[in-house]
Image (cartoon, rainbow, N blue to C red):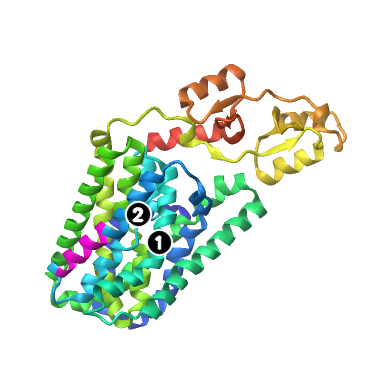
Amino acid sequence: MLDIIRKIQKKLIIAIPVIMVAGFLFGLKFNPTFLKQLIIPLTFLMVYPMMVNLQLKRVFEGGDTKVQLVTQILNFTIIPLAAFLIGRIAFPDAPYIALGLLLASLLPTSGMTISWTGMAKGNMAAAVKMTVFGLIIGSILTPIYIKGLMGTVIEIPMAKIFRQIIVVVVLPLVLGNLTQRFMIKRYGFAHYQKDLKKIFPPFSTLGVLGIVFVAMALKANSIASNPGQLVTLIIPLVILYGFNFLLSTIIGKYFFKRNNGIALVYGTVMRNLSIALAIAMTAFGKDGSEIALIIALAYIIQVQSAAWYLKFTDRIFGPAPETTVKDIMSEGVFSLHINDTLNKALKLLAEEHIHSFVVLDDSDKAVGMFSTAILLDALADETPYETPLSKLPMEPVVFASAKTSLKDALLKMKRNHEYKIIIVDKDNVISSVLSQEEIIRHIAENLKK
């Protein structure tokens, strides 16, 4: 089942139009009113899974203040203003559709921001922070912007919007973070990173498709009576996304380095349409489906344009630099101290589903690597479980910096016959790890592209 959903997730360009057609046909043949009961469950299914993997701690990391600031200025000044003006011009007699365009522009960044930035070899750490900042700022400003810009032509239920933001953003965010913490504590960080983390995004896609289906079904009769409406909706979307891509590309190319420029583009163009859909369908009652229709169509434009833009990133920003350790390493390092016992080593390897860990001395300096091979040898020799690690053989530690190229990292591994590299920061403090599994996975993913 998960494999099928993952395949659909990779084919959103096809899946969303198909679901839209299916919802349209369903709405014509049956009375779709009962589908409204599915809006809240589908909303939670859509938003909660993406919150589980959100890395909130990244907000407090520094080093890219300028690109973060420019990104959020674009996201909450120029882009919403452009959406508002385009909506007023394109839909002078359809304020709820104009509101849908504005709503989509007020909720920037999503998990796809991180994915597309990674595929284009941009600054993924910056993209993660853009996603978190965009989510938090957007949740606060969206009701205020909607009231200020559209309050003269539409009755804006401010209290209801704030309440729905708590339900569809804050509650899933809190529950998602608690879920993440529980899984890491229960199953270990390595197991979470390797196996559990990838379970959740496909379910979010399932929620998106469900909401799109419901929105199309509820608007089916209206569309059937005026099929040209779809064209009038798509053209303003194309203009908005075209303007967004052009503006962010110019700023990203001429004011930032390649990796930050790419992050800025995807951090401003990719909108959190899932949450926009959720708010539209839950906060505006019977008018929600009209608002949701243009947001559903925005999925098609957004995914298509992001995919095409990816093909031209090297031409626009120049070729990607050589892959470095930083691009694929895992955060955090598992370690024990030299006075810890064989029994503790056994438990760490088993609980965290890892093959080795760093052994530290009393000054927290790495003195060796302890692996499953050493453990099995000790067990075969019937070494007492209370034996300290200082009495057992250890493998040498291979060090590198985050800036080390992948090619040099592989050569280090080969020379030392060690297939895990410990990453140290500029102060020679251990910060991360690069294992053979991550390298193999990275190369395999690149071969698929």
> SS for tag 2?
helix
Give the quarter of the image for residue 132.
bottom left
**Residue name at image x 61 percent, y 24 percent:** 398
> SS for tag 1?
helix
What residue is shown with label 2?
A: 72
Q: Which residue ends up furthest to the top in the rendered image?
A: 415
**Residue name at image x 70 percent, y 40 percent:** 349
**Residue name at image x 46 percent, y 23 percent:** 407
Whether residues under marks 1 and 2 lie with C-beta atoms below 8 angstroms apart, the answer is: yes
Give x and y (percent) for residue 332. Answer: 60, 41
Disc 1 residue crowd, few under 14, some 14–19, many 20+, Cα 10 Å? some
What residue is shown with label 1?
A: 137
Q: CA separation, marks 1 and 2? A: 9 Å
- Looking at the image, residue 131 sits to the left or right of residue 90; the answer is right
Residues drawn in magenta? 78-88
Q: How many marks?
A: 2
| Rendered-image quadrant of the C terminus | top left
Give the quarter of the image for residue 363.
top right
- Identity, as a three-letter code, of the amino acid under mark 2: Gln
- Looking at the image, residue 117 sits to the left or right of residue 389; the answer is left
- Looking at the image, residue 13 sits to the left or right of residue 389; the answer is left
**Residue name at image x 34 percent, y 62 percent:** 107
Give the quarter of the image for residue 12.
bottom left
Give x and y (percent) for residue 157. Answer: 34, 81
Please say whether residue 83 is one of the residues in the magenta stretch.
yes
Give x and y (percent) for residue 338. Answer: 78, 32
- Identity, as a three-letter code, of the amino acid under mark 1: Ile
Residue 206: assigned label:
none
Please say whether residue 278 is one of the residues in the magenta stretch.
no
